[in-house]
Image: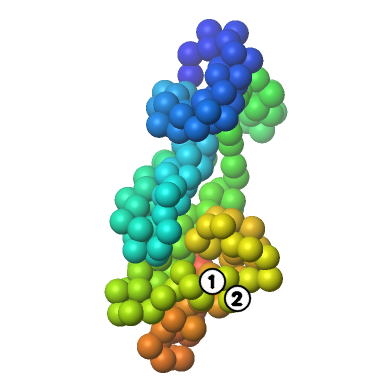
């Protein structure tokens, strides 16, 4: 990263906050890409994925955004694995840099979550195509009013609703639990 950008650090942070507040996410995403802030860029792609979606078929149409998230996280993971910078110099860089960093374990966890969300989205979108009304099941499963389609990127309640929706929407119990069983061991997605 260009060292002179550090002089503008406070201005860049405020600009990004303003873009997010005004919901100018495309511009925010371009700035994040320019700054090589891959983790925040992946977070913005998650917002693109869920934006204006009212069914799981809508989410399936946006799966390409999750592929972008994976690309960003995988490239950040590769960077983390190849970096050979001393821990002390890395700590001093973290105080100066405004680019978000994560350890390899957290990156792997997020990549696994993306795979699980892709599987769940495809499954529930297929259930909708087969006549299941997933959207009307959601309010019946929640104690609180639900204003969005549950994903693995939201709060714990949304995650629980999503996990419960899968066996309920399956053609039979085995089909619904089959997806849960396939995804019980996240290690299949670990990147070594």
* Side (left or right) of 88 relative to 184: right
Q: Nearer the viewer, residue 42 or 123?
A: 123
- Image coordinates for residue 160, horizontal then vertical, percent: 61, 71
**Snapshot colouring:** rainbow
Residue drawn at x 60%, y 19% as measured from the top left: 14
Q: Nearer the viewer, residue 108 or 63?
A: 63
Residue drawn at x 60%, y 21% as measured from the top left: 13
| Label 2 environment density (alpha carbons within 10 Å; few <14, some 14–19, many ≥20) | some
Is residue 135 visible in the rendered structure shown here? Answer: yes
* Residue 36 in the image: above or below residue 181: above
Task: Say the numbered circle drawn on residue 100.
Answer: none
Q: Nearer the viewer, residue 143 or 78?
A: 143
Residue where numbered disc 2 is placed? 141
* Side (left or right) of 165 relative to 103: left
Question: Circle 1 — which element?
Answer: helix
* Residue 18 in the image: above or below residue 78: above
Whole-angstrom CA distance, mark 1 to mark 2, is 5 Å
- Image coordinates for residue 114, horizontal then vertical, percent: 46, 57
Residue drawn at x 57%, y 71% as measured from the top left: 139
Is residue 73 visible in the rendered structure shown here? Answer: no
| Label 1 environment density (alpha carbons within 10 Å; few <14, some 14–19, many ≥20) | many
Residue where numbered disc 1 is placed? 138
- Image coordinates for residue 66, horizontal then vertical, percent: 39, 51
* Residue 145 in the image: above or below residue 182: above
C-beta proximity under 8 Å, tags 1 and 2: yes
Residue drawn at x 40%, y 31% as measured from the top left: 26
Q: Nearer the viewer, residue 76 or 60?
A: 60
Total numbered labels placed on residues in the image: 2
- Image coordinates for residue 153, horizontal then vertical, percent: 55, 55
* Residue 62 in the image: above or below residue 88: below
Q: Quadrant of residue 120?
A: bottom left
């Amino acid at each position: 990263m260009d060292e002179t950008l550090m002089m503008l650090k406070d201005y860049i942070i405020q600009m990004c906050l303003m873009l997010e507040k005004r919901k100018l996410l495309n511009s925010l995403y371009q700035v994040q890409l320019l700054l090589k802030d891959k983790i925040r860029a992946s977070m913005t792609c998650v917002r693109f994925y869920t934006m204006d979606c009212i069914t799981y078929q809508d989410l399936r149409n946006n799966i390409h955004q999750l592929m972008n998230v994976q690309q960003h996280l995988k490239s950040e993971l590769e960077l983390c694995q190849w970096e050979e910078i001393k821990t002390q110099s890395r700590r001093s860089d973290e105080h100066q840099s405004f680019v978000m960093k994560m350890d390899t374990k957290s990156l792997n966890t997020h990549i696994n979550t993306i795979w699980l969300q892709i599987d769940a989205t495809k499954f529930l979108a297929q259930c909708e195509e087969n006549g299941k009304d997933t959207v009307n099941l959601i309010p019946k499963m929640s104690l609180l009013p639900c204003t969005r389609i549950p994903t693995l990127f939201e709060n714990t309640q949304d995650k629980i609703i999503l996990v419960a929706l899968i066996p309920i929407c399956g053609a039979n119990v085995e089909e619904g639990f089959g997806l849960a069983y396939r995804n019980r061991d996240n290690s299949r997605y670990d990147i070594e």
